[in-house]
Amino acid sequence: MELRHIRYFLAAAHSQNFTNAADILHITQPTLSHQIKQLEEEIGCNLFDRVGRSVRLTQAGELFREYAKRMVREVDSATDAIHDLGNLRHGKLTIGVFSSFSTSLLPPILAHFSAAYPGIKVTVLELPTGEMEKRLREGEINFGVAYGPPAADQVIAEELFKEQLALVVGVLHPLFGKPTVRMEELSQYGLIMLTREYISRGLVEAAFAACGCKPHIAMEMNSIEPILATVRCSSLGTLLSDRLVRTLPGLHPVLLLPPIVRTVSLFTRQNASVSAAARAMAALIKSSF
């Protein structure tokens, strides 16, 4: 069994079509079929069921895919580590972050990193914490910046800083210009909140419950940008980091009483190999707070 057999198998499993997979791999369809047949003969069972022009994984194929993905990840990690030795001239880095971090705090860090390491391609994904942990475990991102603690045992959290949530309002909101608001009073005003897959949603609801009231959620969205745009032109508010609000024109932070404090942490996968690019970016993020 060779590495190309594993990569060909994964491409076919993803595409569910040998012709499409062959196009992606830049080989002919007969070549791909022959390589898959060799792999099946070596393993001793069929990995695919052929259904017309499509293919689907057998039960054995489903099981083998999990091991195949791990094998490819380990080989790719080893290759990246070797390429990273002694220099940061080339490479790639994928990180996951929560929305408000990418909006306000991350841009100057990225600018600094790009100036220092122009040959490193950086991909930033805005992810809910649960999805971030999943991608970390599967090796799809190098590390994440999220609210701790993590739910998964394989994910390690290192605290970066603590921040307070504030009510964020535009000029049309009745509380615009006020310094503070109690949770009981806030429950009377409409809010735009992130959807439930975001950990901050549960934190906010728990804070209201602790004060014996419930939030008046008028809208739900899964992205910070449309939330902020709607707050600017309406009488609705939202709850976001007070750090973020200070950088945004046309919006006013109203501090909450009692305060809602959350911990921002650097998430990494336990026992994962760490590339030089990931170490450099993580060090830069840590030094910024």
Image (cartoon, rainbow, N blue to C red):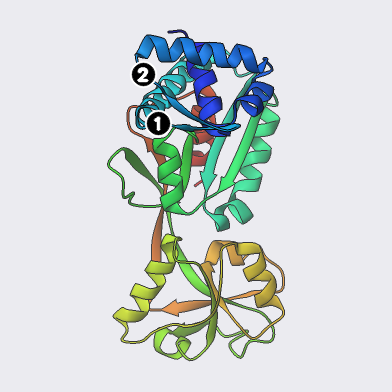
Can I make out residue 189 in this image?
A: yes
Amino acid carrying label 1: it is: Thr
* Cα–Cα span, label 1 and label 2: 9 Å
In this picture, residue 108 sits left or right of residue 142: right
Q: Nearer the viewer, residue 23 or 73?
A: 23
Task: Name which residue lies at 44% across and 66% down.
Answer: 196
In this figure, which residue is indicated by the disc labeled 2?
A: 45
Label 2 CA crowd tier, 10 Å (few <14, some 14–19, many 20+)? few
Who's the residue at 52% across and 40% down the image? Answer: 285
Please name the residue that numbered disc 1 is placed on. Answer: 58
Residue at the far left in the pictured view: 153
Quadrant showing the N terminus: top left
| Placement of 52 over or under 265, stated as above or below | above
- x and y, in percent, of residue 276 in the image: 51, 22
x, y percent for residue 199: 41, 61
Cβ–Cβ below 8 Å for labels 1 and 2? yes
**Disc 2 marks which amino acid?**
Cys
Q: Is residue 266 visible?
A: no
Which one is in front, 63 or 268?
63
Query: Helix, strand or loop at disc 2?
Result: loop
